[in-house]
Amino acid sequence: MKRIFVALVCALLLVACSQDDYTNVIPANSKAVVYFDLKSIAVKSGIGELNYQNELLGKLNSSDSKNDKELSKYIEDPTEIGLDFGKRIYGFYTANDYFCITAKMNDESDFEEFLEFVKKQGLASAVTEKNGVKYAELYGSVQVAFNDNTCLFSMGTGNVVKNTLTQLLSQSKEESFAASTRFEKLVATNKDIALLTSLDIVPKEYVGYFRVGLPETVDNDKICFLSTLNFDNGEMVFKGQAFSDVAQVQKMLDEKSGAFGKLEGTFFSKVPYDGKCSALAVVNCASGDKLLDFCRKIPALRTMLIGMNMNFEADAMLKSAKGDIQFTAVNADNFLVQTNVSDVAFAGGKESYRIEAGEKSAFVNVKDKVLKISNGEATLNSASKLAAPKLLDVKSGSFKGVDLKKKSFFAAFMVGELMTQNMVQKELSSVGVYANYARGVFNNVDAVVLASEGNNDIEFHVMMKDSKINFLKQIWK
C-alpha cells in the first residue's frame, strides 16, 4: 500500500496543461499564499525523466497484475489522473485555519476514475455529490472537494471542512485573493516556489528586522514578505523582499534605516593565509550611530551587545565604525575583524591591547584608524600572504556571479573548506545513517551565500562546484 501511495505522489508531480479561474477559491483575506510549479520541479529533480518512470514501473511486481496495470497507466501518462499540475498548485490558509491546496481540474471523469482506483487500495472513500460539488476523503485525513473546473484539498475532514470548501468553490474572482495586487506580485515571480505572507503571521523574533525605523502606528498587516525559491543548474537561490501595497508605508520602508551603505570591498583582498578561510562576512556601515541603534532594536543583537559590553567597549567601537566591517573565520578556532574607524577614543590611546572574557581572550590593534580584532595574535599581526578568497573576484566585486557592489551585507561559507575540518566531519557523523547522504550532497557544494541590499530584503544561494549540477537533483537522489 505504501509503495502504491508513493508512486501516485510521484505521478502527480509529472502532470501538465492551462486557465487560471481555479485560483478564485483563495480567500480575499488570506495571510499566506504559496505556489509550486510542479512541472518545473519534476523536470529539475529528474522525476520527469523516462528512466525514473521505468524505475517505478520496474517495481510493480505485486500479485495483483490488474492493479499494477492501472497504476502503470498513471505513471506512464499522468494526465490520466484528470488534474492539470502543469499549472501551478496554490496553497493557502482559510479564515478558520484550514490549510488548503487548489489545483486545476483537467478532466472530471478521469479524476473520479482515479479516485475509484485509490479507493480500491483502501486510501480513499467513495465519491459523494451535493449541489454540483463532489467530495471524497483521502487517507482518512484529507478532504477533497471538486467540480468540473477546480479541485480543492484540505487537511482535516468533517462537515465544517466540507462547508468551508463548498463556500470557497462558489467564490467569484472579485471576491477572492486572485483580484488583489498582492496576488499579481506573487504570480509575476515565475519561480519554482513562491510564498507571500503578511508580516502579522511572521514569528515575532523575525519581525523586528523589517520594522526597524517604522513608527508603531504602522500595523504588521500592512507589510508583506514575498519570498521565492528557484533551482537553477549550478545554484539554488532563495530571495525575500518586504513590501507594502500602501504607498505611504512603502515610502517608509524605502527610507527607514540609514544604517547601511553599499559594500566598498576595502578588505576583500586582506584575508590572511593567502585568502584561505571558512567564512567571510561583510557589512557596510553608513553611520555608526544608526548601526548601533539598529542592533539595539533587534533582540538577538541587543543581547549579544550587552554581553560584549561587559568585557570591552563594544558600543563605542561600533559607533566609530566607518565603511566596511569585515569578519573572517580563518577556521573553526581563528577569526579576524577589520574596519576603518572615525576616532580611536575607545582604545584609550593604546595601539595594541588584549581583551579578557573569562577563559577566552582577543587581541586588538588600532593603527592609522584601522581597527583589527582577532583571537589569534599571529593572525592579527599577519602583514604578508594577504589575499582574497579564491571565489571572490576583487576586480569585478563579485562572488561567483553575485554582484557585491549592490549589497549592504554579504556572508559566504566556504563549504569546500569546511568539509575538510574535523569539527564539521564530527558533526556530520552525529546524524548517523544520514551522514553519507549529507556528505554526498555537500561535497558538490562550493559555497553558501547570504546577502542583502538593505534591511528589507534577503537572499540565500547554494552554489555548486559544477555549474551543470542541479541542487534539487542532488537532494532527490
Image (cartoon, helix red, strand yellow):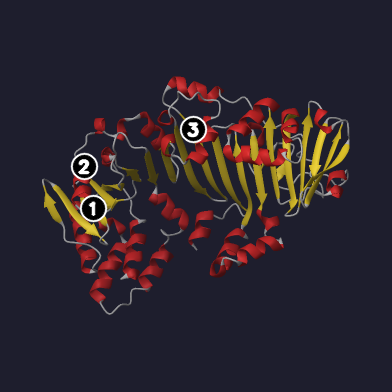
Q: Is residue 270 visible?
A: no
**Pointer 1 or 2: first along the chain:** 1
Q: Is residue 320 visible?
A: yes
Left or right for 423, reference 79:
right
Q: Alpha-carbon distance for marks 1 and 3? A: 34 Å
Q: Residue under circle 1?
A: 144
Q: Residue at x 61, y 67 (%)?
A: 429
Q: Amino acid at mark 2?
A: Leu
Q: Amino acid at mark 1?
A: Val
User: Is the residue 50 above or below the residue 237 in the image?
Assistant: below
- Numbered circles on residues, count: 3
Q: Residue under circle 2?
A: 169
* Residue 77, image quadrant: bottom left
Q: Where does the image place residue 270, in percent across and percent down from the top left?
A: 80, 41
**Position of the N terminus by quadrant:** bottom left
Left or right for 412, reference 212:
right
Q: Where does the image place residue 402, in percent across and percent down from the top left?
A: 63, 40
Q: Residue under circle 3?
A: 242
Element marked by disc 1: strand
Q: Where does the image place residue 403, in percent across and percent down from the top left?
A: 64, 36
Q: Alpha-carbon distance for marks 1 and 2? A: 12 Å
User: Pointer 1 and pointer 2: residues touching (CB < 8 Å)?
Assistant: no
Left or right for 444, reference 143:
right
